[in-house]
Image (cartoon, rainbow, N blue to C red):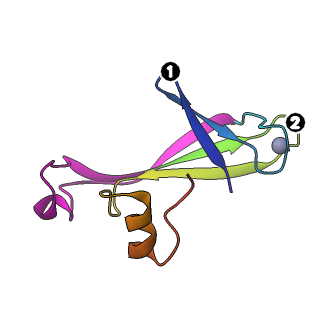
Amino acid sequence: MIRKVSIFGGYYFFCPTCSDDHIMRILDYNVVNDEPGNAYNPQMHSKAVRTFTMEFKVHCEQCGLNDFVKVSNGGWQGGTYADALRRTGGYAGDR
Ligand SMILES: [Zn+2]
């Protein structure tokens, strides 16, 4: 599992293979989907303008691992992390 941390407003992804929190490079991105509106808008006070998924290709310079990280607002985004685990049956993405 690729872990991430936010530093000064940017995200860093750590290699899941290397034991020293080695930071992975983002080599490319792809917009997987991008549509107006959002299925969860009726249930929330805030309104998402669109539903999107972006995929980032990440690479570890130390061990050579290539992987992908997705950022999406297509799933439920509200309440607590424990709420998300209950809604998804135990998986709420990387933390
Ligand atoms: Zn690595």
Residue 55, x across and y down, in percent: 52, 49
Q: For the residue with label 2, is its CB less than 8 Å from the closest atom of ligand 1?
A: yes
Nearest to the observer: residue 25 or residue 7: 7
- Quadrant hosting residue 84: bottom left
Is residue 33 located in the magenta-colored stretch of the structure?
yes
Query: Residue at point 82% right, 34% down?
Result: 61
Query: Residue at point 78% right, 39% down?
Result: 60
Q: CA distance from mark 1 to mark 2?
A: 24 Å
Residue 72, x across and y down, in percent: 40, 53
Q: Earlier in the sequence, mark 1 or mark 2?
A: 1
Residue extending farthest to the top is 8
Query: Residue at point 18% right, 46% down?
Result: 49
Residue under label 1, please give it.
8
Q: Amino acid at mark 2?
A: Gln
Is residue 73 located in the magenta-colored stretch of the structure?
no
Q: For the residue with label 1, is its CB less than 8 Å from the closest atom of ligand 1?
A: no
Crowd class of label 2 (few under 14; some 14 to 19; many from 20; radius 10 Å): few
95 relative position to 3: left or right: left
Mark 1 and mark 2 in contact? Answer it, CB < 8 Å.
no
Q: Amino acid at mark 1?
A: Phe
What number is the disc on residue 62? 2
Q: In this picture, is 32 found above or below 14?
A: below
- Quadrant hosting residue 18: top right
90 relative position to 52: left or right: right
Residue 57, x across and y down, in percent: 63, 45
User: Helix, strand or loop at disc 1?
Assistant: loop
Magenta segment: 25-53
